[in-house]
Image: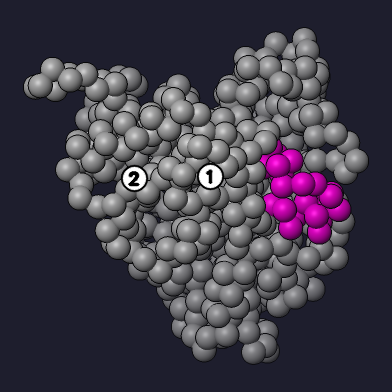
Amino acid sequence: MLFYIVKDMLSLLFLKKYYFCIIDIYGVKMENVDIVGREYEQELIQNYLATQKPELVAIYGRRRVGKTFLVRKTIGAMLSFSFTGMYETSRTIQLREFKANIERYSGRKCERPKDWFEAFDMLRNYLDLLQQDKIVVFLDELPWMDTPKSNFISAFSRFWNEWGSTKQNFKLFVCGSATSWMVSKFIGDKGGLYGRVCRSIHLSPFSLRETELFLRNIKGMDLNRRQIADIYMIMGGVPYYLDMLVKGVPLNKCIDDLFFRDGAPLREEYDFLFRSLFKDSKLYRKVVETLSDKMTGMSRSELLKSLKLKEGGNLTEVLDNLIKCDFIRKYASIGKDERNAQYQLIDNFTLFHLQFVANHNGQDEHFWSNIDGKPQKTSWSGFAFERLCLQHIRQIKSALGISGILSNVYAWKCKSFTDKDGRHWSGGQIDLLIDRSDNIITLCEMKYVSDKYSISADYEEHLRNRASLFATMTKSRKAIQHVFITTYGVALNNYSHIVQRDLTLDDLFCQ
């Protein structure tokens, strides 16, 4: 008995810390902070608030991405009631706090509910008393309310189906970081909630542009775009992590303090991230850690074999949920069917943790500063920049002026071989190509360097041979163009004419 009392006390302490992060997520009170980006999502929320019918809107995405801040900043002044579920807390404590929130909003004492059915009846009774044009309710961290044998989903379904869906002025917004629960058990529910969610909104991490706005306008940090790219390649566009950067402190020192010093605040984040996102976090971690060893990705069949899993398990669901959380991407190789699709780990924070933090012994608290300029960091930066480009395909298409042209993004690779005429082909790989409906295939080269990239005679020959091999193996009759995406552009020399378009880091910052 004492164990459960202590556990619930710790849960309440966690809730206070978590709630403080919601209210004070950027270091100042929420009402004093401007929201950065999220224009599309804000417009969606406003549109649903403006309708003349009941709305049930589910917002999901990876932990720390700013779901709560988005909702509270957009609709906070209109809220009739809100409640935040508590991580690993008993149903008894959850119900007690739910009751306390109703009392705070209503100003009336309530009896303690014995289950979620009674709790939602109490909420219904309170909302029935309101004389408002819009009744707006926000339930945050919904998955954490669904404790074992709580019948939470059944109670929620009854509340919505019997009351909420009949009130023309009722708007119910729900959030959750546990994506597998939100997608499978709530949005994809086959029971009482089937087809009831009016809209699901997936909140992704910030883009480079949004990250720049956040660091400049919220943090007051005056950084150049290469510095911002360096941060993005480590933390991705996750507002919670970006907010931990300290103005005036050199970036390398910030990273050392956040990841490598004794008691670093982000050192244990990886473990908690997966525990809070996914019910079977062990399998999710195995998938992610397996993919981290294959930078270009693996097929589903390769994953099954590597993980020693049998066909017919839940690997497909795991992969889908990881895609929905922006941890991995699914892409096809040109000329290959869906069965050969590749799954690639592209979450910057996860990859940084697995490569540098997970096996760090803690002896060098200045690890990141000390490897500056070393091959270990240079090699990592090259791969990280490629990921950064893959996370900004829309911006690349916009910079190329092909946003309005139907196009598909692929990868391609070919092992070395000897053809029937005895000619040896050395093989090749293209991590990003854009197959366009205007009969052009764009082959993208991504280079992260400290100055303009200079193409050598050998490299120009490599590009020509690879393009020839690509055309031969894919039997494509489309025109082939080489596009370089580099930090500062391509230097003009005798070999740079092979480049049809030259994009820089600045192009990745466009809206």
Alpha-carbon distance for marks 1 and 2? Answer: 16 Å
Residue 4 sits in which quadrant? top right
Residue at 46% x, 78% y: name it: 165
Q: Is residue 499 magenta?
A: no
Specify whether residue 189 is in view. yes
Viewer-proximal residue among 121 and 291: 291
**Residue 410, disc:** 2
Magenta span of residues = 211-234
Report the side of 244 relative to 382 (left or right): right
> How would you classify the magenta stretch by its main secondary structure?
helix
Task: Please tell me whether mark 1 or mark 2 is closer to you in this view.
Answer: 1
Mark seen at residue 260: none
Q: Please indicate, yes or no, whether residue 91 appears anywhere in the rendered image.
A: no
**Circle 1 residue:** 485
Q: Position of residue 469 (x, y in %)?
A: 25, 33
Q: Secondary structure at mark 1?
A: strand
Percent position of residue 162, x then y? 44, 76
Name which residue type carries label 2: Tyr
Quadrant of the rendering where the C terminus is positioned: bottom right
Q: Secondary structure at mark 2?
A: strand
444 versus 407 height, above or below: above
Q: Which image quarter is the N terminus in?
A: top right
Coloring applied to the structure: one colour
The crowding category of the residue bearing disc 2, from other C-alpha atoms within 10 Å (few below 14, some 14 to 19, many at least 20), is some
Report the front residue among 446 and 190. Answer: 446
Q: Is residue 218 magenta?
A: yes
Residue at 70 percent of width and 66 percent of height: 72
Vertical placement of residue 36 versus 284, above or below: below
Mark 1: few, some, or many residues within 10 Å (few <14, many ≥20)?
many
Quarter of image, res 187 = bottom left
